[in-house]
């Protein structure tokens, strides 16, 4: 885009802008380049030794610029001119490019998914329930993130998936089964801590919203502890089982999938069947290459400790739910009714 065109000593003098850079041409050559700002100053010396200075100033609140041309520090010309408009197509392309950059931004994607999750759950239930649900998911996923950071694993953050749950993504691969156990179980552990904190707030305030957060949070984490891949419980059981490197380990994983299918059949959870299908593929592929696995297996102590940790976390969430088994509010009764059935 050309800003101005003039003649100086019978030679063309022009100034144009390209890629946010002002280029001053004199006699067919570029003599000065500056970033395009509200105020710029170009300076060069002609072949005859004349010092040329061109100052440009954007007039506030307008689309006009003022330029002042000086020769050997003496002003010889000063005028105002209207900036030419960009073609409409370039403006559209620019907006599309900006939109694409925003879409690629991880922060924008996270915020959009979080907003979509709150809106979706609000549509199904209520705004208050949606906020409680999202808070439970965030705390759960934050447990995974903290565990990754403990092992020095780079994280990409937390992504909430509407009507599915959440994901804590990392850039690095695991090197030990112990890492898989800790990272997987820390989500439900943080969820249990949140449920206990909500119980304390309920005891202090008597507000049923905190009680609802406790039982709903524990129900979600209890679901995540099912021994099914890619759920957290499935990762814990797989790491324990595959550290045995025997048919017993594979049998435990298959039993977990069978349990998941039974739960899916009873409660009509089609999404759980979807999880089980891909989890079964992962188990079979890893079982075939178990002898070439680079993951350091758990020793006997590690397997026992992981199993006890898993059971205690599971019992903790069941205890939170059981604490409201006789509650009058239907939301507080729901988790216990599900477990009882």
Image (cartoon, rainbow, N blue to C red):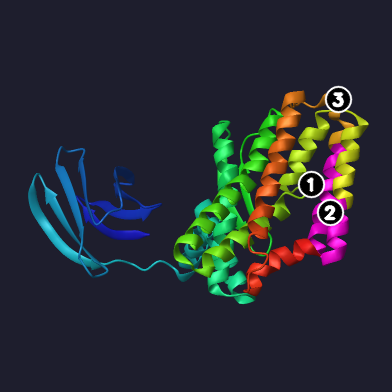
Q: Work out whether residue 79 can be spotted.
A: yes
Q: Secondary structure at mark 1?
A: loop
| C-beta proximity under 8 Å, tags 2 and 3 | no
Q: Is residue 340 magenta?
A: no
**Residue 341 point in image, percent of width and height:** 81, 65
Q: Residues within 10 Å of mark 2 (few under 14, many from 20)?
A: many
Q: Residues within 10 Å of mark 1 (few under 14, many from 20)?
A: many
In the rendered structure, find residue 13 and report the number of the disc placed on it: none
Q: Work out whether residue 113 can be spotted.
A: no
In the rendered structure, find residue 291 and report the number of the disc placed on it: 3
Q: Tell which of 158 and 261 is nearer to you.
A: 261
Upstream in the sequence, badge 3 or badge 1?
A: 1
The CA span between labels 3 and 1 is 23 Å
Which span of residues is magenta-colored? 259-285
Q: Secondary structure at mark 2?
A: helix
Q: Which residue is mark 2?
A: 260
Q: Please tell me which residue is depicted at 85% across the width and 47% down the height of the picture.
A: 256
Q: Which residue is mark 1?
A: 227
Q: Tell which of 257 and 6 is nearer to you.
A: 257
């Amino acid at each position: 885009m050309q800003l101005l065109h003039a003649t100086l000593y019978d030679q063309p003098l022009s100034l144009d802008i390209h890629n946010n850079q002002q280029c001053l041409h004199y006699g067919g050559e570029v003599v000065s380049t500056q970033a395009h700002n509200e105020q710029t100053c170009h300076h060069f010396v002609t072949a005859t030794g004349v010092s040329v200075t061109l100052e440009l100033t954007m007039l506030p609140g307008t689309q006009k610029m003022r330029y002042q041309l000086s020769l050997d520090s003496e002003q010889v010309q000063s005028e105002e001119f209207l900036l030419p408009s960009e073609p409409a197509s370039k403006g559209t392309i620019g907006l599309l490019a900006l939109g694409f950059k925003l879409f690629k931004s991880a922060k924008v994607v996270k915020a959009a998914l979080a907003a979509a999750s709150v809106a979706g759950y609000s549509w199904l239930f209520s705004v208050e329930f949606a906020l409680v649900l999202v808070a439970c998911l965030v705390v759960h996923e934050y447990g995974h993130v903290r565990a990754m950071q403990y092992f020095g694993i780079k994280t990409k953050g937390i992504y909430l998936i509407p009507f599915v749950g959440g994901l804590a993504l990392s850039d690095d691969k695991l090197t030990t089964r112990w890492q898989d156990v800790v990272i997987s179980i820390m989500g439900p552990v943080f969820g249990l801590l949140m449920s206990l904190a909500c119980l304390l707030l309920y005891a202090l305030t008597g507000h049923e919203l905190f009680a609802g957060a406790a039982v709903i949070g524990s129900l979600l984490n209890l679901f995540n502890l099912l021994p099914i891949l890619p759920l957290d419980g499935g990762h814990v059981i797989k790491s324990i089982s595959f550290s045995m490197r025997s048919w017993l380990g594979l049998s435990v994983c298959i039993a977990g999938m069978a349990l998941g299918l039974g739960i899916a059949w009873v409660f009509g959870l089609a999404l759980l069947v979807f999880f089980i299908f891909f989890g079964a593929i992962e188990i079979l592929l890893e079982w075939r290459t178990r002898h070439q696995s680079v993951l350091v297996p758990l020793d006997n102590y590690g397997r026992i400790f992981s199993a006890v940790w898993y059971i205690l976390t599971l019992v903790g969430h069941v205890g939170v739910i059981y604490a409201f088994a006789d509650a009058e509010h239907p939301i507080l009764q729901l988790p216990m009714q599900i477990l009882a059935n």
